[in-house]
Amino acid sequence: MTMETLMRERLEAALAPTRLEVVNESHRHAGHAGDDGSGESHWHVVIAAPAFAGQSRIARHRMVHAALGDVMLRIHALSMDLSDG
């Protein structure tokens, strides 16, 4: 299973998003610190989920980290655009 598939499955199960984009940006960081050579170290997610309603930005980030669980240990960088839309 690819990292993208794993991330997508976990985020969908935990947050039931109405919008989910999982973008591998590792190619933009090749040779930089944190590039482990796997091609799956740097990610960007766009998530709109009702579960984020009323939550602070930090709480939303924590929800994503919790949803990804041990996958976070295999990710060097994760940027996020999160909304309750």
Image (spheres, rainbow, N blue to C red):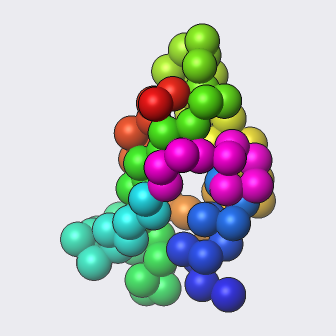
Tell me if 37 is positioned left or right of 50 in this view: left
Q: Nearer the viewer, residue 38 or 61?
A: 61
Tell me if 17 is positioned left or right of 14 in this view: left
Q: Nearer the viewer, residue 81 or 43?
A: 81
- Total labels drawn: 0
Quadrant of the rendered structure where residue 8 is? bottom right
For the N terminus, the image quarter is: bottom right
- Asked if the magenta segment contains residue 64, the reply would be no
Tell me if 65 is positioned left or right of 33 in this view: right
The answer to whether residue 41 of the structure is visible from this angle is yes
Tell me if 14 is positioned left or right of 60 in this view: right
Up/down of 17 relative to 1, above or below? above
Q: Nearer the viewer, residue 35 or 26?
A: 26
Residue 84 spot, x, y in % from top left: 51, 27
Task: Kindly identify the residue that appears in the image at 57 percent across and 37 percent down.
Answer: 49
- Asked if the magenta segment contains residue 14, the reply would be yes
Up/down of 7 relative to 2, above or below? above
Magenta stretch, residue numbers: 12-20
Q: Nearer the viewer, residue 34 or 3?
A: 3
Up/down of 30 relative to 9, above or below? below
Task: Kindly identify the residue that appears in the image at 47 percent across and 77 percent down.
Answer: 40
Task: Kindly identify the residue that appears in the image at 50 percent across and 21 percent down.
Answer: 57
Residue 59 spot, x, y in % from top left: 62, 22
Residue at far left of view: 28
The answer to whether residue 43 of the structure is visible from this angle is no
Residue 77 spot, x, y in % from top left: 44, 55
Quadrant of the rendered structure where residue 33 is? bottom left
Task: Kindly identify the residue that appears in the image at 43 percent across and 59 percent down.
Answer: 21
Quadrant of the rendered structure where residue 65 is? top right
